[in-house]
Image (tube, grey):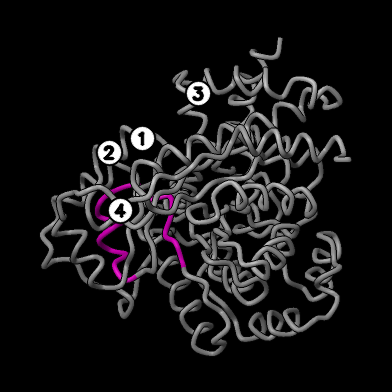
Amino acid sequence: MRSVSEKIDETIHELAAETIEPGEPPEAESSPALRALKALGTEPWVDTGELEKARAVWKREFGALTTNNTLANQVVQSGVMDGIIRETVVRLGDAGAGLSEEEKITEIGFVINCKIALRLVQAFKVQVSVELHPCVARDIGRTLHFARRYFRVCPDYFIIKVPLTPEGFLAVRTLRREGMPINFTLGFSARQNYLAARLANPSYVNVFLGRLNQVVVENGLGSGSGVGEKVTLATQGAIAELRRQHPDVSTRLIGASIRGGEQVGFLAGVDVLTIPPPAIEAFSATRPETVKTHFEETVRPGIDAGDHAASFEKLWEVPAEFKVFSEVLAQRRDLETMDGDALRRICADEGVDLFHDFTAADYEKITGKGKIPRLGDWPGTVALDDLMTQSALMSFAKDQAELDARIRSFLD
């Protein structure tokens, strides 16, 4: 006899899954600028969850699409998913009688995220990166549970996004050993992503470069120009070096949070760029002969000298001692049974300031400031990349809360 949880899982799977009609990506025009980008080793992805916006900019060179909680919320607030929400509420019915309201909302949200991504899969026949609910970000067991369910829904096309938390590091290590494609998201530094690649070997890691430029501007520390670009290029170099040294590491870098077409061109040669529709349109006007790599150039970031300058330098540096720490950690036999708190303690004991032990009050303060923190509110013991990751996660949680509120209205 199946347990209640198994019945719920099966009901949700039946609601979320679809038969993917066989076929190739749609016929589309080629973009000379994107073609030049691909010739330099970059795979461009479309950064939107909205089918119509994706269709409007789709070119032959695109290899995948990506969604997130913010983009999913935009789709849900348009009302296009209302019918699916109603059907899921009804079908969950008796099977979900023992679930709390929040658990029901999480289950319905899972179905919605699957449907948003599957619309894109059906239309373009390429992989789509899908995001976990933020409520599981600090829970290894629930991360594993929902990631496996995503993979079961669409193993050929779904790439599962897992946020860069201590629990995420450990969960991704397990999921990758199970053969799942994982996009380890919300990265902001070369060292975060170097450790992720060495420890867990996700399919992809990220630098949210546009937010790094923005944090400089909003904190009055300079123009912000080139900051995210410098971190992205440095991260690409660090990941490429790691792949050469360890053939078992296959992690690729995504340059994410792109703000404009000029950033796309500057980052030519980065493994993957996720590009929102306005930036795609802007970059399409670029003359292909001007697209070139900038790895050998010295990028001078627009940061004024001051108290916070050193914290930004940590974003693009991967010191030799950090590489040694990563190697020693990767060899630990207790990684398979370790929890997030243990990983935090190890980092603290070794003087690695990646995983600050944020309190509930800290998270509330982070949420209040949005995705760009006010740096003066935080002591120097809180590393900038760690703070940016938490701010990004909490901003996604805020958007997810709006999505959840719409679902809740159907339960009342």
Up/down of 244 relative to 35, above or below: below
Q: Identify the residue under disc 4.
A: 24
Q: CA distance from mark 4 to mark 2?
A: 15 Å
Where does the image place residue 378, in percent across and percent down from the top left?
69, 49
Compare residues 27 and 242 and report the one nearer the observer.
27
Query: Crowdedness of circle 3 by 10 Å Cα count: few (<14), some, many (20+)?
Result: some
Q: Identify the residue under disc 2.
A: 55
Q: Please, what is the three-letter code of the amino acid marked with disc 1?
A: Leu
Q: For mark 3, give the secondary structure.
A: loop
Which residue does the image show at 31% across and 35% down from the upper left? 53
Visible residue check, residue 223: no
Q: For mark 2, give the secondary structure.
A: helix
Res 8 quadrant in image: top right
Question: Is 49 left, or right, of 219 in this rendering?
Answer: left
Contact? badges 1 and 2 (CB < 8 Å): yes
Q: CA distance from mark 3 to mark 1?
A: 13 Å
Q: Which tag, 4 or 2, sits closer to the chain's start?
A: 4
Contact? badges 4 and 2 (CB < 8 Å): no
Q: CA distance from mark 2 to mark 3?
A: 19 Å
Where does the image place residue 220, in percent across and percent down from the top left?
47, 46
Q: Which tag, 3 or 1, sits closer to the chain's start?
A: 1
Q: Please, what is the three-letter code of the amino acid marked with disc 4?
A: Glu
Locate the N terminus and report the quarter of the image it occupies: top right
Compare residues 397 and 318 and report the one nearer the observer.
397
Report the disc number at residue 51: 1
Is 323 in the magenta?
no
Q: Please, what is the three-letter code of the amino acid marked with disc 2?
A: Arg
Q: Identify the residue under disc 3.
A: 81
